[in-house]
Image (cartoon, rainbow, N blue to C red):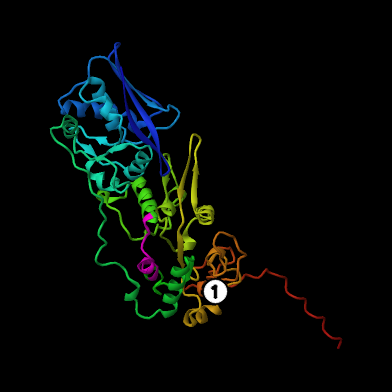
């Protein structure tokens, strides 16, 4: 007899249905999982065995085969623990198999039988609603799944025993309620800024039209302070935008306690971020910072310090509003409609244009100052392109050190010593003129 339970595998923010098939038959005692599982899915054998023992059950001394269909779809993540355990319990007769066919199941099992939170519950709930099925998920993720459909049946048990008691009718589980995370009482607000009228006006225009913005100024001028206050003047997320942002955050595992937030995302990665961190990628093709900032603000501070290859990788997401990550066996896409805000200094030292700095270094500026202030740091640098090296500001110029005096033999002369006079070659004395005749 083969028992079946439906779960999902994630491709981007889309949930693909996966059929978990369990067969208990005669043969050598073994527990085998097939269907292109990754390391986390393969390790679920020990977690499922320990969770069943903690719940008062034990695996039969037979051959247990678990098939994850379709077999050519990669299966990644620990959320396959609970569907495998429920399919095993149905094959053993501990749960009604007909009841489990109505549900989409996902969750990670602990060794004591409790069900731990997993990432991607909101996309899984939306996928289950599309399949006209109910959902079984961990209790901490219940509020997150409740946003999929108010009429959808959702079970959020704490442990395997609680779920088994629900199907027996001895402990009925109630439907979890959707929750919103309370915004912190103290958030950066643009109204706190005194002065900077031109910069605040530029931020207001950028917020009204959704324009990208590049701020250039010396250190301490308030570029980062103004950028962090841009979300305070942006409109709240619409219901559709809230769902898209929350689905990406759910895939990344960044929804705390299953609560959604109405505030637009603000991401500020460090300038040492790699291509996979900023654009997305990795073994499991996770969303990057540009996708996590979807429908929000992506702030790149110290823009010239980012690697040129990383900045060039932002071209396609900014133009199309979508990040496409292609691997040998699958293709993943994440929405990436962001408002790009960048900040940079006018030169390497940050004091270009200041009279006190430029006047003192103008006389000592060497002819070739390209090393002191490279072309991509100058004010002529443009995003995503390589411009011609323009003359750098004189504030970054450093006078060349004078060469130390050297002796005639070529060795340097110690400080305070005077070089010896250059020896002259010995020459014969000039002949005396002959005496004049008497």
Instruction: Give the residues in magenta.
Output: 226-239
Q: Is residue 172 left or right of residue 186?
A: left
Q: Nearer the viewer, residue 330 or 379?
A: 330
Q: Taking 218 as reference, is 78 left or right?
A: left
Image location of residue 330, percent across then percent down: 48, 36
Front position in the image: 365 or 61:
61
In the picture as drawn, the residue positioned furthest to the left comes out as 170
Report the residue at 49% width, 72% height from top.
Answer: 417
Q: Is residue 63 above or below residue 132?
A: above
**Residue 177 at what x, y percent from top left?**
23, 49
Residue at coordinates 54% horizontally, 74% vertically from top-left?
393
Q: Is residue 240 left or right of residue 183?
A: right
**Furthest residue in direction bottom, as rendered:** 438
Q: Which residue is mark 1?
A: 393
- Residue 63 in the image, given as x and y percentages of width and height: 29, 15
56 magenta-colored: no
Crowding at label 1, few (<14), some or many (≥20) Cα neighbours within 10 Å? many
Q: Residue at x 29, y 11 (%)?
A: 26
**Residue 414 in view of the camera:** no
Q: What is the x, y in percent for residue 193? A: 34, 76
Quarter placement of the N terminus: top left
């Amino acid at each position: 007899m083969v028992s079946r339970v439906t779960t999902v595998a994630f491709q981007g923010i889309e949930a693909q249905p996966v059929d978990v098939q369990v067969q208990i038959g005669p043969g050598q005692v073994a527990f085998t999982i097939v269907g292109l599982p990754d390391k986390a899915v393969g390790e679920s054998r020990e977690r499922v065995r320990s969770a069943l023992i903690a719940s008062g059950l034990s695996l039969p001394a037979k051959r247990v085969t678990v098939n994850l269909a379709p077999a050519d779809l990669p299966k990644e993540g620990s959320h396959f623990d609970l569907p495998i355990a429920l399919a095993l319990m149905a094959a053993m007769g501990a749960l009604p198999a007909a009841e489990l066919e109505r549900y989409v199941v996902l969750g990670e099992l602990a060794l004591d039988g409790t069900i731990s939170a997993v990432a991607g519950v909101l996309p899984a709930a939306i996928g289950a609603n599309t399949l006209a099925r109910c959902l079984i998920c961990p209790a901490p993720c219940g509020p997150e799944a409740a946003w999929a459909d108010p009429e959808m049946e959702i079970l959020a048990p704490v442990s395997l025993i609680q779920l088994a008691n629900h199907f027996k009718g001895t402990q009925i589980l109630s439907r979890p309620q959707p929750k919103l995370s309370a915004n912190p009482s103290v958030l950066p607000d643009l109204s706190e800024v005194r002065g900077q009228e031109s910069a605040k006006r530029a931020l207001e225009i950028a917020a009204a039209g959704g324009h990208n913005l590049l701020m250039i100024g010396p250190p301490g001028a308030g570029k980062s302070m103004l950028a962090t206050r841009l979300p305070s003047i942006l409109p709240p997320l619409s219901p559709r935008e809230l769902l898209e942002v929350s689905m990406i955050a759910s895939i990344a595992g960044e929804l705390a306690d299953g609560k959604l937030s109405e505030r637009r995302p603000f991401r500020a990665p460090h300038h040492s971020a790699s291509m996979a961190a900023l654009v997305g990628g990795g073994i499991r093709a996770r969303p990057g910072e540009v996708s996590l900032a979807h429908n929000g603000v992506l702030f790149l501070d110290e823009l010239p310090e980012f690697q040129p290859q990383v900045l060039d990788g932002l071209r396609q997401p900014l133009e199309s509003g979508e990040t496409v990550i292609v691997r040998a066996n699958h293709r993943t896409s994440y929405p990436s409609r962001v408002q790009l805000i960048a900040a940079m200094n006018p030169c390497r030292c940050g004091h270009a244009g200041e009279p006190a700095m430029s006047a003192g270094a103008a006389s000592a500026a060497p002819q070739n100052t390209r090393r002191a202030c490279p072309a991509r740091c100058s004010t002529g640098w443009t995003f995503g392109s390589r411009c011609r090296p323009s003359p750098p500001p004189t504030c970054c110029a450093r006078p060349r050190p004078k060469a130390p005096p050297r002796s005639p033999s070529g060795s340097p002369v110690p400080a305070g010593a005077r070089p010896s006079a250059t020896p002259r070659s010995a020459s014969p004395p000039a002949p005396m003129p002959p005496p004049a005749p008497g």
